[in-house]
Image (cartoon, grey):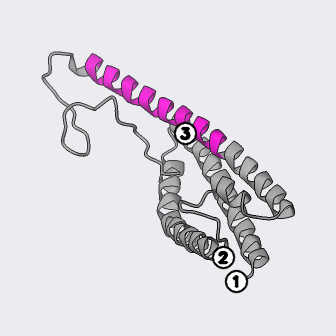
Amino acid sequence: MHQQALMDELGVFLDARQAELLETLARLGELRAAVIRRDEATLTQLLEQVQQDADRRRQMDAEQRSIEQRLLDVFDGLQAPVTLTRLSACVEEDMRATLRQKQTALLETAQRFENELNATEMLLWECARCNRELLAAILGRNQQAQTYDQQGRNQWDVHRGLVSVKL
């Protein structure tokens, strides 16, 4: 495959990844708003959207691996793992400028995503803490009643996140 055609395909793919991150950012905002409003319908709708998007993400991940492999085949000096920084060292100056613009935009969006994710996780932790305090106030603190998580543990591990996201 010609280098320019492959770089064009990579550009389209990076734009799609950027759009995916922006959609996820919007959903995190919707999630926080729904939790604050206690909007069960919106929470259910968001859960369904996440489940529907799982297939699309798997397809994008497979497409990314395919593009990475073709980049390794076309650009002799490129080594695995393929990164945009390594790739920009192997391309011509005009392609390099475009690639760096896309890389900068992706990095900025990824940083916003990380900040929003942390804010969402803190909100969920605070909701969980408030719920535990309410239960303790209603039931008492003398361990007459215990609550369990999904795995059957009667105590949450404070070092594990409530939300797991792979970037």
Q: What number is the disc on residue 117?
A: 3
Q: Secondary structure at mark 1?
A: loop
Q: Main secondary structure of the magenta part?
A: helix
**Among the two numbered marks 1 and 2 on one chain, the one whose residue lies closer to the N terminus:** 1
What is the magenta range? 110-137
Residue 51: x %, y % from top left: 46, 62
**Would you name the residue on which mark 2 appears?**
74
**Residue 127 within the segment the image draws in magenta:** yes
User: Which is nearer the eye, 37 or 87?
Assistant: 87
Rounded to the nearest whole Å, what is the CA distance between mark 3 and mark 2? 36 Å
Q: Nearer the viewer, mark 3 or mark 1?
A: 1
Give whichever of 99, 128 is nearer the camera: 99
3D distance between C-alphas at marks 3 and 1: 38 Å
Mark 2 neighbour density, 10 Å: few (under 14) some (14–19) many (20 or more): some
Residue type at mark 2 is Val
Find disc 1 in the rendering and name its residue: 1
Measuring from the top left, give residue 78's x and y in whole percent.
62, 64
Instruction: Give the amino acid type for the residue marked by disc 3 in the picture.
Output: Leu
Q: Residue furthest front?
A: 77
Asked whether the beta carbons under mark 3 and mark 1 sit within 8 Å of each other, the answer is: no
Q: Amino acid at mark 1?
A: Met
In the rendered image, which quarter is residue 140 located in? top left
Could you say whether the residue bearing mark 3 is in a helix, strand or loop?
A: helix
Q: Are marks 1 and 2 in contact (CB under 8 Å)?
A: yes
- Pointer 1: residues within 10 angstroms few (<14), some, or many (20+)? few
Seen from the viewer's position, the closer of residues 139 and 88 is: 88
Question: Of label 3 and label 2, which has the lower sequence position?
Answer: 2
**Residue at 72% from the left image edge and 57% from the top image edge:** 89
